[in-house]
Amino acid sequence: MTIDASGSSPELVQLLTPEGERVEHPDYDIDLTPEEIRSLYRDLVLVRRIDLEAVALQRQGELGIWASLLGQEAAQIGSGRALTDADMAFPTYREHGVAWCRDVDPVKLLGLFRGVNHGGWDPKEHNFHLYTIVIGSQTLHAVGYAMGIQRDDASAATIVYFGDGATSQGDVNESFIWASVFNAPIVFFCQNNQWAISEPLEKQTRIPLYRRASGFGFPGVRVDGNDVFACLAVTRKALEAARTGQGPTLIEAFTYRMGAHTTTDDPTRYRVASELEAWKLKDPIERVKAYLFKNQQADQAFFDSVDAEADQLGADLRRRCLAMPDPEPLDIFDHVYREPHALIDRERAQFAAYLEGFEK
Ligand SMILES: Cc1ncc(C[n+]2csc(CCOP(=O)(O)OP(=O)(O)O)c2C)c(N)n1
Ligand SMILES: [Mg+2]
């Protein structure tokens, strides 16, 4: 790896400009076929549609809450498509694009936010862990998992996602130390979307986040988080380093949260509209579209077909979301412990008696 851990400041890695121009980088080149680029474009459009549909469903009272990925599609698709089946991913609560890359049915994401299940998918089936709300805690789980891979001698890597705000958590800093001193096969993928709810980045750090890695003794790199080519290239290289015994890398994907923190938040209370306008010009989807058009690697019929697929996906998702049955109220007690447990049995009986008190 040419990125060093000395704290020197490599530039933002970018391979595709906001205008859709391909640029070279000495350390991160990537050779993508037109078909692969069209496929990335399709991923980006479809995950944006899943997200928009989910926001609409929440607004109509069909979901309790939703954490939008708007603006972060390239960071998630680029890193997600860098993973092999054997790699393991640990998400926060916003990684719907990574879930897509791990073949998690999006309706399962909605189930969690609709409150009809307690997780949604089998992490083992997808090598994609359950969503984690406790900020930063998944970094410790991921390092533990990575150390397990290391002890199994498996040629796989672990990736863990977290936000700029999470970098201030003790858990994240502890996980950096463990990963570093045990040379764990892990990639720390920080989506710096500039905000932690209403707290701006300046309240988390006085130095660029990727430089934190040098203090822990492993490389850090800042990538244009709205550039799907660069996110793919940088993550691939870091995963390969992890798989080949070179230890952890911190990737800071420099991006922007275009929506609210969640549907319960109103960002107009704490950030100015001009900031949003400036980031709109760096849209992760538009630049791939411009590239494909300019290089005649896709025609209007292609873009129309992706839009039609997105419409169909959105409609299908909505239909399947509304059709999800409500869980039985007592089901909540079934997944607390693997074995029967006296306290849980008592609580189940109490709650059953309480429910009996209602008219049928
Ligand atoms: C340990 C903990 N503290 C506080 C919270 C409340 N909380 C939820 S999201 C959030 C901000 C996280 O910001 P960031 O890490 O930048 O991720 P983003 O939401 O921007 O993707 C906070 C403080 C929490 N869930 N867990
Ligand atoms: Mg953030």
Image (spheres, rainbow, N blue to C red):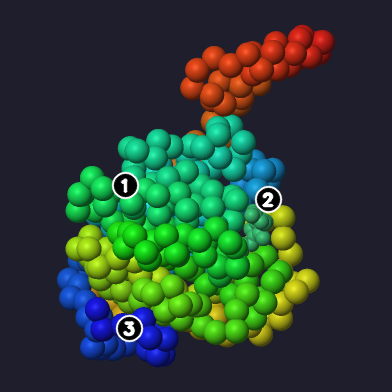
Helix or strand or loop: what does disc 3 sit on?
loop
Question: Does 3 sit above or below residue 330?
Answer: below
Q: Tell me: 221 left or right of 152.
A: right
According to the image, label 2 marks what residue? 59
Whichever of labels 3 and 2 marks the residue nearer the N terminus, that label is 3
Q: Is mark 3 within 8 Å of ligand 1?
A: no
Q: Is residue 125 left or right of residue 191?
A: left
Q: Earlier in the sequence, mark 2 or mark 1?
A: 2
For label 3, count other residues whose C-alpha is less than 10 Å away and answer few (under 14), some (14-19) or many (20+): some
- Residue 184 percent coordinates (x, y): 32, 59
Front position in the image: 351 or 256 = 351
Q: Residues within 10 Å of mark 2 (few under 14, many from 20)?
A: some
Disc 2 or disc 1, which is closer to the eye? 1
The answer, for residue 290, to whether it is visible in the render is no
Q: Amino acid at mark 3?
A: Asp
What residue is rendered at 64% in x and 81% in y? Answer: 202
Amino acid at the residue labelled 1: Gly
Who is closer to the viewer here, 223 or 293?
223
Q: State the CA–CA distance, disc 3 to disc 2.
A: 46 Å
**Secondary structure at numbered mark 1:** helix
Q: State the quadrant of the N terminus.
A: bottom left
Q: Are marks 3 and 1 in contact (CB under 8 Å)?
A: no
Residue at the image point whose x is 60% and y is 51% from the top = 134
The location of residue 268, given as percent across then percent down, is 74, 72
Instruction: Check contact, mark 2 vs mark 1: CB within 8 A.
Output: no
Which residue, given by chain and number where applicable, does mark 3 sit on? Answer: 4
- In the image, which disc is placed on residue 148? 1
Q: How much space separates mark 2 and mark 1, taking CA atoms? A: 42 Å
